[in-house]
Image (tube, helix red, strand yellow):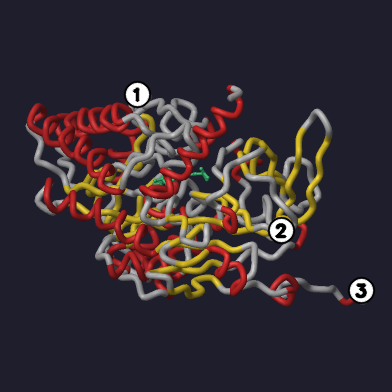
Amino acid sequence: MSRFFIDRMALWCYNISIMNTRETLKINAKGHLEIGGADACDLAEKFSTPLYVFDEKHIRDMMAVYRDTIEEEYGGHGCVLYASKAFSCEAMYAIARQERIGVDVVSGGELYTALKAGFPAEKIYMHGNNKLSHEIAEALDAHIGCIVVDAFSEADLIEREAEARGIVQKVLIRINPGVEAHTHAYVQTATPDSKFGFSVASGAAEAIVRHVLTKKHLKLCGFHCHIGSQIFEKASFVLAVEKNLKFMAEMKERLGFETEELNLGGGFGIWYTDEDPKIPVAGYRDYLSALLDAVKKGCGEYRLKEPFILLEPGRSIVGEAGVTLYRVGAIKEIPGIRKYLAVDGGMFDNPRFALYGSKYTAVLANRAAEEPQEVVAIAGKCCESGDLIGTNFNLPKAKVGDIVAILSTGAYNYSMASNYNRNLIPPAILVKDGRADYIVRPQSYEDLVRSDAIPDRLK
Ligand code: LLP
């Protein structure tokens, strides 16, 4: 057997094993990919393609593992917030509400969606490095739980708006502890050169604490940090905790400020391809345990009161729960260069390859048990050469009409989708025990022109 063939076999076996160990994905008796108990080919037939499919059980299991770990290992003195930027739609807030966790929102639009879904305002935290004045007003009018301050001017604005309403708003301050996490530069957030947070090292963090403490209508409860996304090294998270605790101890000593809440952000990595570790749902408990242990240890060393701990996972809750289904259209082989399978989606539903060179695993959903025979690029249908889902997929020889499933597309795919080329953003369905329902309905051409306007002089 050639080395090439052995490699491909190994990868194929690996992919099959991924599917067999993930409850989300299985190969059924027909040799079709199954997601959350539903046959992917039936879903493609019924709901058409491109289609975002989400496995409800995986989402709930992930929310529960974080919630229960805080309950069992930290006496419930904390709360998980789903970072809804990963996938925001009303159903996600409804699930988070049922799972008794909080959410973080990063814009007026996410806040509006959460409130519309009936999410309890007191369990909403608001982020953003440049929150607009109307977003602050909306947050205060809704009486949300907490705003995470990320600018001097923002602290002044919240103070004015809170005073005008005769209320005191709970706030955290986003600090930049200076931790360089091993991940893509675009999703690192705690390096010295970052638009986020106040640097501890430069003294900016202490300055904003002093500033906020002068405000009568702000109640400073503590600090927030988020070091980046798609990170696997526990050591980076632990280092961030240590730096936070050191800062908390300094603020206690210098300003007499005692931290009640510490928000450690999100960032836990997920499996996209065989280059990533495959962490089972229960394995995420270890990440959180490592953080909680570091908090307990540091508080002991610095003689600090153990703070209420918040965590903001987004990708790890929803990423592996999602699969995108496409149908293969044009197939083009460029001899000696590569073979392109073009699908009915592309960068308008998944811009992550174009933005970050992100890698994915593909499966032919209607022939999921077949061995791979070739390496292909999967292209979208947009008018630009960089519109690719990826360049190195091992697949059986695909034919026009086959269904391609791209795995682990639940996080930052729908949420970063666009109507580029006036393509329609695909709908999303939620699957549980084989039953599928829309959570985002299909767009129509009418939706595309809904906000267009033609000035009289053009008529
Ligand atoms: N908290 C804050 C303040 C954040 O900025 C983020 C993500 C999270 C929590 C959630 O992090 P997660 O658990 O999802 O890693 N569009 C990029 C990811 C950007 C992440 C932005 N912030 C991507 O597609 O990879």
Instruction: Report the disc number at residue 419.
Output: none
The reply, left or right, for residue 364 in relation to residue 335 is left
Question: Which amino acid, mark 2?
Answer: Asp
Near-viewer residue (210 or 445): 445
Q: Earlier in the sequence, mark 1 or mark 2?
A: 1
Closer mark to the observer between disc 3 and disc 2: 2
Kind of element beneath mark 3: helix
Label 3: few (<14), some (14–19) or many (≥20) C-alpha neighbours in 10 Å: few
Q: Residue at x 66, y 36 (%)?
A: 375
Q: Find disc 3 in the rendering and name its residue.
A: 457
Residue 266 locus on image (x, y percent)? 36, 44
Instruction: From the top left corner, tell me how far across and down residue 162 is, in percent.
Output: 34, 62
Q: Residue at x 39, y 62 (%)?
A: 161
* Residue 194 image offset from top left, x and y in percent: 48, 32
First in sequence: mark 1 or mark 3? 1
Q: Residues within 10 Å of mark 1 (few under 14, many from 20)?
A: few
Image-quadrant location for residue 120 = bottom left
Q: Which residue is denoted by mark 1 in the rendering?
A: 201
Residue 344 got which mark?
2
- Give the spatial CA distance, label 3 vs label 2: 37 Å
Tell me the quadrant of ligand 1: top left
Quadrant assignment for the N terminus: top right
Q: Is residue 176 visible?
A: yes
Q: Secondary structure at mark 1?
A: loop
Q: Nearer the viewer, mark 1 or mark 2?
A: 2
Quadrant housing residue 62: bottom left
How far, Cα to Cα, is label 1 from label 2?
49 Å
Mark 1 to mark 3 CA distance (whole Å): 57 Å
Which of disc 2 and disc 3 is earlier in sequence?
Answer: 2
At 61% from the left and 26% from the top, the residue drawn is 4
Which amino acid, by three-letter code, is at mark 3?
Arg
